[in-house]
Amino acid sequence: MKHLGILLSGRGSNFLAIADAIDRGQIEDAEISIVISNRAEAAGIVAARARGLATHVVEARGRKRAEQDAEIVACLRQHDVDLVCLAGYMRLLSPEFVAAYPQAILNIHPSLLPAFPGLDAQAQALQYGVAVTGCTVHFVDEQLDHGVIVLQRAVPVLDSDDEASLSARILEQEHVAYPEAIALVLSGNYNTVDRRYIARASQNATPIEEAK
Ligand code: GAR
């Protein structure tokens, strides 16, 4: 059984998509061991409590990031977490945090990275005038929105789009992409070569010819 730790700061819809994917068996042999928020009033942490999951709020105000992150790492270790999933966690991780979970922290970002890192990625895409944007699930390294990409899903930008409509269509794809990426990473059937994530054929997979 693999143990997931979720970090969030707000609404928590990606967290709920992950929790639902575990419940319906799309992410096999895994459970959410702890949900951590840096905001006590985050809707996501309220939803986690309502689902009966263990939760922890880390006080952010007036504290250095290293001190706050040390508390988070201790909490993740206490709950035997194997894979950390950032789900709308709006703080940069300290180098010590990243080093504590090498290639074991995932993030979701609402653009096709490396385009539009940072805040308000959907508004950045509209302002730039791109025809296609989307979402990216990637491993977290020390740089913002930068680590090895596990998967991306594209979303067309429509002439009629404003930030709200585009964000909503990207979010739908986030909810598909994040559980899929977690299942891939937990399966262990991949290698990383430089910046490339290369899936290996699963030993249990049915060859395409046989499946016909
Ligand atoms: C999502 O759109 C996620 O991609 C974004 O915050 C939102 C959280 O929504 N994350 C980032 O921009 C990280 N750089 P949620 O709380 O409903 O999952």
Image: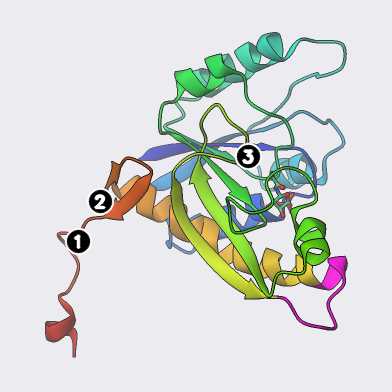
The residue sitting at the left extreme is 210
Helix, strand or loop at label 2? It is loop
Q: CA distance from mark 3 to mark 2?
A: 28 Å
Depth order, front residue of 110/53: 110
Image location (x, y in percent) of residue 10: 80, 43
Q: Which residue is mark 1?
A: 201
Determine contact: label 3, label 2, CB under 8 Å: no
Q: Which residue is mark 3?
A: 53
Q: Is residue 111 left or right of residue 194?
A: right
Q: Which stretch is magenta?
A: 157-165
As displayed, is residue 26 above or below residue 58? below
Determine contact: label 2, label 1, CB under 8 Å: yes
Magenta stretch contains residue 15? no
Which of the 4 image quarters holds residue 195?
Answer: top left
Q: Which residue is mark 2?
A: 189
Q: Can residue 126 be seen from the camera position used here?
A: yes
